[in-house]
Image (cartoon, helix red, strand yellow):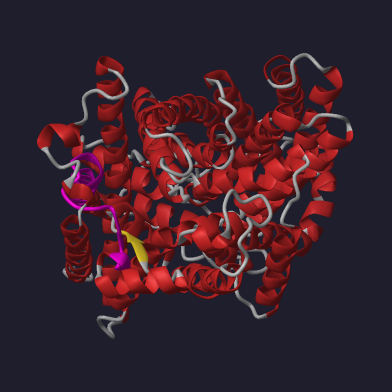
Amino acid sequence: MEPTTKGKGLPENAYRKLKEGEVYMPVVPDDLPLPEVTGYSLFWGMFYAVVFSAAAAYLGLKIGQVFEAAIPIAILAVGMSSLLKRKDSLSENVIVQSIGASSGVIVAGAIFTIPGLYILGLNATFPQVFLASLFGGFLGILFLIPFRRYFVKDMHGEFPFPEATATTEVLVAGEAGGRQAKILLKALFIGGLYDFLVSGLGLWKEVVSTTVFGWGKQLANATRLEFRMNIGAAVMGLGYIVGLKYALIIASGSFLAWWVILPAIYYVGQFNPAPILNAAKPIAAMMPMEIFNQYVRHIGIGGIAAAGLIGVIKSHKIITGAFKLAWLEITGKAHEDMIDNKAPRTQTDIKMKWVSVLIVSVFLGIFVFFLLLVVKGNVLYAFTGLAIVAVIAFLFTTVAARAIAIVGTNPVSGMTLMTLIISSVILVSIGLHGDDGMLAALIIGGVVCTALSMAGGFITDLKIGYWLGTTPRTQERYKFLGTLLAAASVGAVIFLLHRTFGFGPGGLEAPQASAMAAVLKPLMTGQPAPWILYIAGVILAVILDFLGISPLAFALGMYLPLHLNTPILAGGIIAHLVYKSTKDEKLQVARREKGTLIASGFIAGGAIMGVVAAAIVFIGQSVTGQDGWNIMKTIGTSKWVESSGAEILGFFMFLLLLIYMYWDSKRTKVEE
């Protein structure tokens, strides 16, 4: 009998809890597997891993948000197989998506920490970035394997898995996937062109502010109040996917920081002629962004750290059961559904003895990496760094996986901040501080951050495979390949962007890395840290949690600059308006889903063209020198882009983009 999935959709019990004695049967039956790893699936999986790593790294360093590549890659995979008329390519497309989706998770681990080294004046080398990402990704895969059955099989119907659900629906869509791919590619072109006209050619200003108007400038000078917005297509598209609820929470945190706390600090601080804390100048001489970076952002940092701790406390049952589950996997006692001592194909993982051997091997690799490239041959420091990585990464793996399973959001930034604080305290206590201590702590944070990011992303892949009937062992094996390619790509992109733009003030924002550096420096150099501001953030996070508001999202809004949160809110509002544009439930879903495809295209297109623009500048500088050829100077827009006319045009163009997003999303039918 030839295996086929033609005309098959997901079983009726795919998303609900199973009844007593009921068994879930995946789309691809256990005894009739489809081709999974082929030359076709390997090539496209590797291709997407490299391309989306570059795109996600650029976007993340610019706005602090890494878009999840799984859905766009799934759409492209389905569209490509449809275009090439490949039959029964469902399992191949799962492997394409699984390998390619390594991009976003590896990028998150690297860009949230490594640019902090440059911001602190410590130049990271390519091997340091590459190996931190590689070993972190490998740990995330290996630590998650013992928990695969618990999350994807034993808890079937208990967790919603929003991202895995969306990706699975795309992969199952079959013939409809070709039309979806066309929508995505069209949006990718429009979003990419729009953002390139801004960041590449400078036809209008990228960040607009009310200070372009006379009344706005007077208000900012008198009270430090201003409205700022990044008008990029990629950032707005991200807001559409986030949705109005979380966009409002993030924006509310930003509004509290910028329109309440910041003016209050200026109002009181303007009467003090001396600098406060570690500031270089008095508050009266500071502009809004300077006050935000020096004081307000620390409240958000404290909130993020507390939100991560709250997540750990709420997940304590999973953490305490982690060792037991791992032991049951090693001894084989957890496999109650084995037939003749052999697990079904769809429940076959890499054997735990090999997982154990690989974990030990990765630990050894991390130790050697720390010893030779991080702590200059000090065995005690290298062993301490390894111990911190091993304990924290293992404990937080299940927290990351659970967060993705429930809400589709991984609080990796909060947990990484906790890692940096813990690492700093431990390293200083054994005598490692100053520049060497900051280097070690950020590399440790990079490994842990990547491990947790990978754990959250990989559980999505494994759930998709469970619903569709892919062999878990195959996904697990080839995830290592995607991790290798993504780690190499993100290392190259970070190096390119550092050489081209730099990070921090005057360069790419790298907001998470800036926050990490801000936390780390006082701890490692003996300077007075703003503990009161951190504590204020902690108290705020606890209050928000009591009120049922996501403290992580709110705190994220407090430490990201205002101009990066306002377009997210704009995208969330468009998503809400699209959904409410009709009372027909099926049409609501169809319009919202088309909007999601358009938003994904904007994100991917804008990010990819951002990398292209960076490459053009980098090549020009490499050939002609640091002050040499520049595309904006060549076409005469370098002065125009800084003018008030370019800023007003930016407002207008962003409004047109929002109108297009709403109009095109509404222009759909239920059957699409």
- Any part of residue 134 in sight: yes
Q: What range of the chain is rendered magenta? A: 185-211
Above or below, 61 against 176 in this view is above
**Rendered residue at 71%/68% (across/down):** 536
**Relative horizontal placement of residue 528, taking residue 465 as reference (left or right):** right
**Relative horizontal placement of residue 13, taking residue 548 as reference (left or right):** left
Residue 4: image quadrant is top left
Percent position of residue 502, x then y: 43, 34
For this rendering, which residue is in front, 336 or 114? 114
**Relative horizontal placement of residue 525, taking residue 190 as reference (left or right):** right
**Rendered residue at 79%/36% (across/down):** 388
Query: How many marks on residues?
Result: 0
Whether residue 204 is in magenta: the answer is yes
**Rendered residue at 70%/78% (across/down):** 546
Percent position of residue 434, x then y: 74, 31
**Rendered residue at 15%/42% (across/down):** 637
Residue 480: image quadrant is top right
Q: Main secondary structure of the magenta part?
A: helix
Percent position of residue 142, x then y: 67, 34
| Residue furthest out toward the front | 273
